[in-house]
Each structure stands twice: as structure tokens, then as C-alpha cells.
Amino acid sequence: MNSGFLSVSGAAKTFGAATVLDGVDLSMGRGEFISLLGPSGCGKTTLLRIVAGLMAPDQGKVALDGEDITRRPPHRRDVSVVFQNYALFPHLSVAENVAFGLKARGAPKNEIAPTVARYLGLVQMGAFAGRSIRALSGGQQQRVAVARALAVGPKLLLLDEPFSALDRKLREAMQIDLKRILREVGTTAIFVTHDQDEALTMSDRIAVMHRGRIEQLDTPAEIYHRPATPFALGFVGLSTQLPGKVVQAADGMVEVDTEAGRLRAKANFIPGSAVLVGVRPERVAIGETKANRIEAVLADAAFQGARVQLHFAAPEGGQILAEVPALPADARPGTRLTLSWNVEDTLVYPALDLVA
Amino acid sequence: MTKGSRFDPVLLLAVPAVLYLALIYGIPLLVLLGRSMLAGGAPSLAPFVGFFSDSFSWIVIGNTVRVAILVTLLCLVIGYPTALALARAKGLAQALILVAIILPLSVGVVVKAFAWQIVLRRDGVVSQIMTGIGLWDEPQRLLFTEAGLVIGAANVFVPFMILPIYSVLKLIDPRLGEAAATLGASPVYRFFKVALPLSLPGIVTGIAFVFSMAASMYVIPSLLIGDRFQTLATLTGRSFLFMRNEQLGSTTAVVLLVLTVAVVVASAALSKRLGGAS
Amino acid sequence: MTAIERIASFTVWLLAAATVIFLLTPLVVTVAVSFGSSAVFTLPAPSWSLRWYQALGRSRELWPAVLASVQLAAFSTAIALALGTLCAIGLLRGNFRGRDAVVTFLVSPLMLPGLVIGIAMLETFRAAGLRDVWLSLVLAHVVITLPYVIRTVYAALSLFDFTLIDAARTLGLSYPKAVLKVLVPSLAPAFLTSGMFAFLASMDNYPISIFFTDAWTKTLPIQMLQYVEESPDPTIAAISTLLILLAVAVLVVGDRLVGLRRMADL
């Protein structure tokens, strides 16, 4: 993977007093699939529009395939976009929509029809070629939008929350389908989403965005197991979070006092630092089997099929969660339980207030 | 339709207005139509046969249609770019264009036609400007010419071209233009393949409005071109008001009615077939 | 941007600017002439004066016409607002086949030649033995004002979410109160704009009024046209300037109440 196929460096954008992008760097390789994941207002759509050329950055550079395209208008970038509302042309048929980009680029007449047929086939919409856009369902429009974006053979495909209007079942089917299609075509793609499951399922790498910055750019597994910031811990997946204070530090190990109890972790902090301790719920066991132990009162248990998710009463500013295969027989809301987990699974961050 | 055929009492609210317009407006129009096909009490198309076999009638029809087409074209040529600019403008520019459209709309047609009398005179503003920039060798009078009539009428009617086009343009999803751009379409290509086709329903509506108004105008030609130039509308008015020839007036009124209804109906059908932008 | 795109964009803005000037020209000219000393409309005026406003003050023909037109417009607009709003609600809530055709009929007076409508009404009124000038004028002018109200209020109503009324009722309002608190405020802009344009349309109407006025009762446009044709002097520009001022005032109030952009929805 040549990791400089697309490189965004120092991209910044402000709207009035609001800083929407605060010096973002992003580098991706040819054929890679990266998700920009974050809550609304984190700057992910702005970054996508800057890459597409629909918006100019105040500062920073965008380079694609070795060329600086920062000032290049969108129609000369070879970057296709699948828009959130699909933005299909209502006055054109399905086939004419897919042919639009080819015609706009002056593709030879005899190549247009076969290319359109090929891409409509790829998204399983071949039978709808002559239909009007208005006659299509949301999922069908989605497929046409993907075919239209891919038919021009873009260097880079951008997808702006393309599944947000679909219901859950259809969304999951489309995720798998899109992954297959992109693999077949071999397109490099950036996928904008606020849905962590979607990002974890589909991406080679995920860029977690928060307040106009990329907080972490890593593989889905790494982001889940080693979140780099408290925001990544909180936004991607569930977690137990306990605020506390470092009381001892030596040899890369710290001891943290929390209201729930004293915990040990591998980290470097000065004694006295305010910190946030985190652990993923599936790492938490019931009983005193692991090194870090706390006691907590069960508040609620949510049956989730293969596992049970347990919520406990937590000290202020924290939350305590566990996911276990089965609920202990005598446990009910109000029962006091001992929870434990490994020192290696314990994550420590500077307290949120200091980051903000 | 078992449910739909049940009478809904809320419909009663509509009855007074519908009844009013049917009595005061609908039935009189039908009576006018019916009576125009009577001659001396018997059903006859003689008045129309007489009208259409008179060569003067064809001059009048020609005047009406020609002036209406010219006014419509002028309105389209200056109105479309204005609607486009209005849809893209923000802040002060947008407010200025809106005021320039709505303010004249709320000023009477007699006032505007009177002002054009002054502007189009031999020593009027147009003449001064044209000689000033050297396009005309000597001052010319546009008042009481067809060109003057077309200019004055276009001035009065151009808001009715701009507003329907603007209302369609502003509904076009801006992402359609962005989508076209990311697919490789240049701004000019985007205009001709996306914005223009999507605004066609507005154009059709604007053309129908302006054409039917220009074909029916009475005050503007009275002031800007005078009696020697007759259209269906001025002839209708004169037949009733001055010549006391109500037979001729009824005939021309029906011809004018059929002409404008045909244009409005055709445009409504076309506009519906083209569909909206949304 | 390429050169072609730059030229295209420049042309659009140039034409728009030219159209703005074109649209405002008659108004500017009227105002300029009204303050000029010249009796033959010379522009630029040799010197400024208020003599035409003094002449207007003494006019025996124009003021009665102004009064007649304002009364007529106010009366016919009030009737149209009452009938038209009820009609729009009835048509929208009472879903039935052929509704579009009925709506088209109701707004069609806006699109048909005024002269033809006037002649048709003249003949029918005559046949019905109606000779009263005022009654004829009011009956005729409601035909002009009613379509404005029906069109605008109907369009606003079709955008209104009627479940809001149900929501208000479940929150404890009686049906009339829910209508008053929820429906009326969201219809107010349409009500105001349509009333404004209906009023102006009635004030400005010539081709229908001409058949119903007589030597004693003349509406303003008819009196003004007669004045322009018989004894043109800038007194007519002075009263036109006052009318423009009225239009500006209406526009300012309209902008405050509903905003210019919504007024352009008409």
C-alpha cells in the first residue's frame, strides 16, 4: 500500500467564529477504505467536501495521486461522491443518471451504453434502466447513486452517510453489498458516518473525529481495544468509565483511587493527576477472578441474545457496565456484585476536563 | 371510493366562494360564449365567419400575437438571468432584486405606462442615452411605435416571468449541481444539463402568464401606441366603449378568450408533463 | 473558472443588474418628473418645485377617485378574505375528486383577459337589471380579489401539518382554541400577503372597472387614464409618486410582517 495516494495536510476551515476543521492530516493508500467516524458537527462532512472540491479549505493542502488538487474545481478532480440524499437527477432516467458523468467527460458514444449496463448490473439494477428516479425506493436510489459515482471510474469515491435514510435491515444488507462492489472495482473510498457499527464493519481503517480533529486513525480492532483518547473510548463501543486520582506511579505502572475502589494499570502519570479509568464491558467478569476489583450495585440487566448487558450504579462522572454470558442466578436489581478485570485491559486517560 | 363518496361537511365552507364565482363570473362567461354564437336569435357562426373573412381582423390578430410573442421573448431573455441571479444572490443583492420586482408590482399599470410615455419620447431618457453613447445619430421617438409598446409592456410583465422561474430554481436541490460537478461536469455543462431542464416548468408557466397578459393588455397600448394600432383587446374595449358595436366586441372577446385559455391550458399540461424540480 | 464560465457568470449578473434598473426606471422617472418645474415632463428637470403637489391638492377630480378606489378595494378585499379563507379550508380538508379542476376555476380570473370578464359581467348584470354602480363595482372587484386569497391561502394550507391541531388538542386545548393558537398564526403570513396583493389589484384594476363606472363614480385608474389622455401635466406624476410611496410603505410593512422572500412566493 502506497500510503500517500490521498494526502490531506493541515486542512483547516472556520465558519464565522466556529472552527469546523482544526488542522487535519489524513493519508491513505490506493484501494484503501477509510471511515470518518464522529458525531454531527465533528467536521467529517466538511473534510469530505474539501476533498471533493465542493469547499475550499482556509489552510492546508489536498494531494491526490501525486498531484496537488487543493485549488482544482470539483469537475476536474476525478473524485466521485455518493450524497446523503443521493442527489439523483429527477429529470433523467436511471440509465441517464448513470450515463451523466460519462457524457459530461465526453466519453465516446459507443462506450457509454455498455459501461452504464455494466455498472447497473454491478449494483443489481439492470432491470430498472429505463425507470424514472421518482419510481424507485430508497434502497434502489442508493444503488443507482453508487453506480453513477463508480461509472466514471473515479480515483477516489466519497460516501457521505449514504445509508442513514435506510431502515436497519436494508442498511446492513447494503453495507455488505457495497463492500463487495468496492472490492470488485478496487476503488479507494472514504466513508463518512456517525454509526460506529457501520464504521467497524466496513473499514480498513477508521478516523475518529472530534471537534475538528482526527483523534485516532487506526484499524477497527485497534480503535476498539486501544482507544487513544477518552472520546474514542466513549464514542466507539461501550465502556466502564471511572474518574479517579493517581496515588502511586512506578516502572510504567500506576495505582488510581476511584470511588469504586483502587485500580492498577500500565500507564505513565505523575502522582496526583486526575485521570479517567476505562475498561471494555466484555473484559469485565463477575467475581474476584481478576486483579482489578470493584464492588457495584446492579441497576439493570438487558438481555441481548448471546449475552447479557449489566448496568451498575456508578459514582458521579462515571459508568459501570459489564457484558457476561449469563446473569448469576440470584442477581436482581439492588444486588451487590464484585466485578474484576485484568490490569492489561485497564485503560487510563487524562481526565476529560483537562482535554477540553 | 366508498369512503371518498361520503359527504364531508367541511366542504360546506367552500360553497359560498364557489357559488359566488360561478354566478358572478362563470355563468356570465358561458353566456358570453353562448351569445357570441347567436345571430338574430338563432344559432349561427355567422359573426365568426364574418370576422375571420375580414382582412382587417387578421391584421388585428397578427398585431396581438406578434406583440405578445415579442413581449414574452423579451421578458424571457431578461427575466431568466434575473431569476438565476436572484436564486444565487444573498443579503443585500437579493433584497435589491426582490424590491425591484415587488415594488413595481405594487404600483399601478397606469402609473407605469404614463412613465414610459415620458421615457420613450423623442427627448426622453432612452433617446438621450442612445444618442449619448453614439448608437443613434439623432434623437428618435419610440413612443407610438411597436418597439416602444413592447418595451413598456415587457417592463410591466417581466415580474410574472421572473417569479415562477425563481420559485422553481430555488427549490432545486443544490446537491444536484454538486453531484454533477463531482461527476466531471463543468459549470456551463451543469447549467444546460441540470439547472435549465429542471427549471423548464417555471419557464413554461412564466411564458403562459406573460403571453396571456400581453395578449389581453388594454391600458398599455392605449397610452404607448394609440388608436391606429389595434389588438384583439383594444378592439374589444373600443367596440364596447366608443363604437357601441357590441356584436363585434363580443366576437373579438371570444376570440381573445379562446386564445388565452388555449395558451394557459397548453402550458399547464406541458408543465405537468415536465414535472417539478422536487 | 475558465474564461467562458467567467463571461457567462458576468453576463448573468450584468443582465440582472440591467433588469433591476429597467424595472425601477418608470418609478424613478415618475418621482423625478413630479418634483420638476417643467410642465412638459422635461428631464432632467430645469429646476425643482412642488407646484404639481400644490396643483394636486386643488384637484377636484383625483381625490374623489382616490377615495372611491380605496373604499372599493378595502370592501372587496375584506369580502374576499372571508370567503376565500373559508373556501381554501373547505377545499383542502374536504378531499374529493375533481378538486384540482375546481381550484383551477377559482383562480382562473387571474389568467383570463380582464376586458372579457368585464364584458361578460356587464351583459349579465344588465340582463339581471342591476343598475347600481357601487354594487356592480363591488361584485366585480370581488371576482378580482377572491382568486388571490384562495390561491395563496390554499397553498399555505397545503403545507400546514394538521396533526399539529390534534397535538394541541391532546395537550388540553379545545378545538376552536387549537385552531386559534396553531392554525391562525401559521396562516397569518399568507392571509396578509394575499390581502395586500388583492387590495393592490383592486386599486389598480382598469379593464373590468371601466364597464361599471359612470360620470359620477370613477375609480382612480380610470380617472388617471382620462387625465393623462385629456390634459397631461405632472399633477399625474405627483399623485403617482404618492401611490409609489404607498407601495413602498406596504412593502416595508410586508417585509416586517412576513419577509420579502415569502412575498415573492406569490
Image: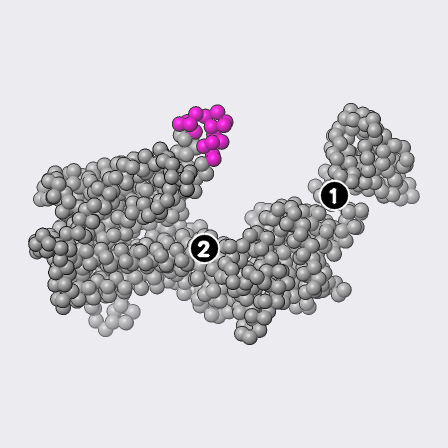
In the image, taking residue C177 as reference, residue A257 lies left or right, namely: right
Query: Residue B149: percent from the left, percent from the top?
Result: 22, 62
Magenta span covers which residues?
Answer: C163-178
Quarter of the image holding residue C144? top left
Residue A270: assigned label = none
Query: Residue B202: percent from the left, percent from the top?
Result: 38, 56
Front: mark 2 or 1: 2
| Residue type at tag 2 | Ala
Image: A17 above or below A79: above
SS assignment for the magenta stretch, majority: helix
Query: Residue C43: percent from the left, percent from the top?
Result: 22, 58
Q: Is residue A285 visible?
A: yes
Q: Chain of mark 1?
A: A
| Residue type at tag 1 | Gly
* The one of B49 and A319 positioned closer to us in this rendering: B49
**Residue shown at 64% from the left, 63% from the top:** A122
**Residue shown at 58% from the left, 58% from the top:** A145
Disc 2 crowd, CA 10 A, few/some/many (<14, 14-19, 20+):
many
In the image, taking residue A330 as reference, residue B151 lies left or right, namely: left
**Residue shown at 56% from the left, 70% from the top:** A113
Q: Is residue C42 visible?
A: no
**Residue shown at 25% from the left, 71% from the top:** B136
Query: Residue A230: percent from the left, percent from the top?
Result: 75, 42
In the image, taking residue A7 as reference, residue A252 lies left or right, namely: right
In the image, taking residue B43 as reference, residue C263 lies left or right, namely: right
Q: Which residue is mark 2?
A: B277
Which image quarter holds the N terminus of chain A? bottom right
SS label for mark 2? loop
Q: Is residue C164 magenta?
A: yes
Residue A237: assigned label = 1
